[in-house]
């Protein structure tokens, strides 16, 4: 399909944990208690680790965004981006809505991914909180240094309480952003709804799986075995939490500064310069207007993929929209 901004059809996915009602309420799908479609992958050229196709986003005509970008990378991404990164969006955007605590897990960094997974990306990620039940928290980074021997023992014993207890606990509220560097153990309480930005992979190493239908010996270590997989864990204490958190922002640059190496998230910075972007309208409505592409109406719950070829663009009206973009080339 021609590189033009357009609305994205829903792409809500089943996963191993429960959730997804708030995604369905925002995006217009059906919702039911106990549902297990807790993620929507937006403008995705990334597949789930268990599939060759699940996770890929389709455009309005049913074609895959991946195929459209590969056919016209400069039209979608821009010459400078392609020269720096190749025909990759460098970005995966998700809506994530958990009805149960996610397991303590981590994602490998780029060095580990190159050495052990033949991949150029790790999985640094960040969450922008859209809704949170009272008292809900995220858990991020070890409070104290964790020895390799103790970590191996806790994983072997499936000691979920000890693993969660070893992490910093951060209460969150709408408008908070949390950066999760690759290698940092983390988990999310139930009742938290986030927009997640990340490097475009599906690499996760699970340290426990309490109350989840998972076999860690089979599913927990990326096929590497825990002896190798646990080498990806950053076992030092996380001491500078303030650099990983930005509180209560709804306009301007929404991410902690260190996120810019991996992705950008902003709102209300119109007009936006030409470049690939993923836009989610959280509230209100308006009109998408671009210098070099037809305009169209947007409203709460719409997701838009923006191509470089559209030129400068903005959304007029009452819409409050979150704009996810790759790092600058």
Image (spheres, rainbow, N blue to C red):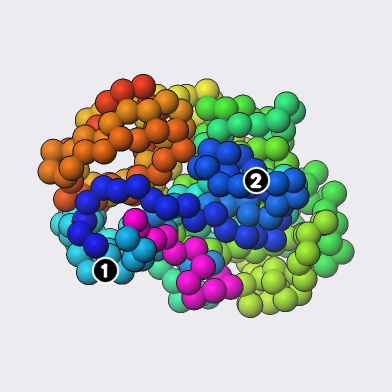
Residue 8 appears at what percent x and percent y? 38, 51
Residue 266 in which image quadrant: top left
**Label number found at residue 70:** 1
Residue drawn where x is 54% and y is 54% of the image: 12
Magenta stretch: dominant secondary structure: loop
Does residue 189 lie above or below 231 as drawn? above
Residue drawn where x is 51% and y is 68% of the image: 54
Residue range highlighted in magenta: 49-60
Residue 219 in which image quadrant: bottom right
Outermost residue toward the left in this view: 292
- In magenta segment, residue 53: yes
Residue 260 appears at what percent x and percent y? 37, 42
Residue 62 appears at what percent x and percent y? 36, 63
Q: Is residue 143 something one can see in this rendering? A: no
- For the N terminus, the image quarter is bottom left
Does residue 215 lie above or below 293 as drawn? below
Q: Which residue is mark 2?
A: 31
């Amino acid at each position: 399909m021609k590189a033009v901004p357009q609305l994205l059809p829903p792409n809500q996915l089943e996963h191993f944990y429960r959730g997804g009602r708030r995604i369905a309420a925002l995006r217009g799908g059906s919702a039911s208690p106990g549902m297990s479609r807790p993620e929507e992958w937006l403008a995705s050229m990334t597949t789930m680790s268990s599939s060759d196709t699940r996770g890929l986003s389709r455009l309005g005509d049913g074609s895959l965004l991946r195929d459209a970008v590969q056919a016209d990378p400069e039209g979608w991404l821009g010459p400078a981006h392609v020269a720096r990164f190749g025909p990759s969006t460098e970005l995966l955007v998700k809506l994530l809505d958990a009805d149960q605590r996610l397991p303590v897990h981590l994602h490998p960094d780029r060095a580990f991914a190159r050495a052990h997974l033949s991949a150029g990306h790790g999985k640094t990620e960040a969450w922008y909180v859209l809704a949170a039940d009272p008292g809900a928290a995220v858990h991020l980074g070890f409070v104290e240094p964790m020895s390799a021997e103790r970590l191996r023992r806790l994983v072997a014993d499936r000691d979920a309480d000890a693993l969660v207890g070893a992490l910093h606990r951060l209460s969150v509220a709408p408008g908070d952003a949390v950066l999760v560097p690759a290698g940092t153990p983390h988990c999310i309480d139930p009742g938290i709804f986030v927009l997640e930005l990340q490097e475009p992979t599906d690499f996760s190493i699970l340290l426990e799986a309490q109350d989840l239908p998972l076999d860690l010996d089979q599913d927990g270590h990326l096929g590497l075995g825990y002896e190798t997989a646990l080498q990806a864990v950053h076992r030092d204490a996380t001491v500078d939490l303030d650099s990983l958190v930005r509180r209560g922002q709804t306009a301007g640059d929404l991410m902690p500064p260190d996120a810019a190496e991996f992705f950008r998230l902003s709102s209300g910075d119109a007009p936006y310069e030409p470049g690939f972007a993923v836009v989610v309208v959280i509230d209100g409505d308006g009109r998408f207007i671009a210098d070099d592409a037809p305009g169209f109406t947007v409203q709460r719950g719409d997701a838009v993929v923006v191509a470089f070829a559209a030129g400068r663009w903005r959304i007029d009206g009452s819409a409050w929209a979150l704009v996810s973009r790759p790092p600058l080339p």
